[in-house]
Amino acid sequence: MIASVSGEVIDIALDHAVVECAGVGYRVLATPPTLGTLTRGEHVRLLTAMVVREDSMTLYGFTDPDARELFGLLQTVSGVGPRLAMSTLAVLEPDRLRRALADSDVKALTSVPGIGKRVAERLTVELRDKVGPAAAVAGGVSAGPAGSTGDQVTEALVGLGFTENAASQAVAAALAEAPDADSSTLLRTALATLGPRR
């Protein structure tokens, strides 16, 4: 089991980064907020969760242990796999997710593409007693190093599986409503517009 990777960031794509460790490049899938904190050429340490399937071994990366813990916890619920767990963490920061689960906030959970009312209810029933109290919510996600906030959110949506055209339209609509919104707010608003990925 690979629990963390530490090395130079040699590539950042829409849904993953490549981190070189001792001459080996590891492809690590991550949420848009996590990818936004990385810079090519800089040293990084990411906590990882390794998911092994018959046809693949995939690393998922996190900057904080709370997010990694929630990633694993979400997958204990029937119908929630690694991709849906990552989408959930892309929309709801760990503190907000813990609060939604503890308070049985189905509305917040259904704002995640792919989570319908039934899955949201299952999540709250099965996990509300397993999550600790949420800490005070920190500030929003800061914008990444390059490109406008709108461009970054569009790329993030494409990374989550939406078409570039649909993502661009959703971001444009979100920006029209709130021109000064930060990337985190824009992402949530655009995801609410798009609904579950087809």
Image (cartoon, rainbow, N blue to C red):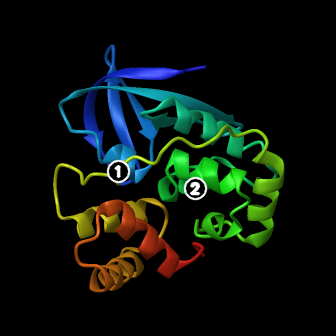
x and y percentages locating residue 114 in the rendered image:
64, 67
Foreground residue among 173 and 10: 173
Foreground residue among 100 and 196: 100
Q: Is residue 56 visible?
A: no
10 Å crowding of disc 1: few (<14), some (14-19), many (20+): few
Residue under the image location 74 percent in, 59 percent down? 104
* Residue 116 placement, left or right of 189: right
Above or below, 189 relative to 34 = below
Quadrant of the image containing the N terminus = top right
x and y percentages locating residue 129 in the rendered image:
79, 42
x and y percentages locating residue 120 in the rendered image:
74, 63
Residue under the image location 75 percent in, 71 percent down? 117
The amino acid type of the residue labelled 2 equals Thr
Give the mark toward the camera: 1 or 2: 1
Q: Which mark is residue 4?
A: none
x and y percentages locating residue 128 in the rendered image:
76, 48
Q: CA distance from mark 1 to mark 2?
A: 18 Å
Foreground residue among 172 and 198: 172
- Mark nearer the N terminus (1 vs 2): 2
Above or below, 35 relative to 66 = below
The amino acid type of the residue labelled 1 equals Gly
10 Å crowding of disc 2: few (<14), some (14-19), many (20+): many
Pointer 1 residue: 139
Q: Residue furthest top?
A: 22
Q: Is residue 106 visible?
A: yes
Task: Determine the image quadrant of residue 10.
Answer: top left
Task: Determine the image quadrant of residue 56.
Answer: top right
Pointer 2 residue: 88
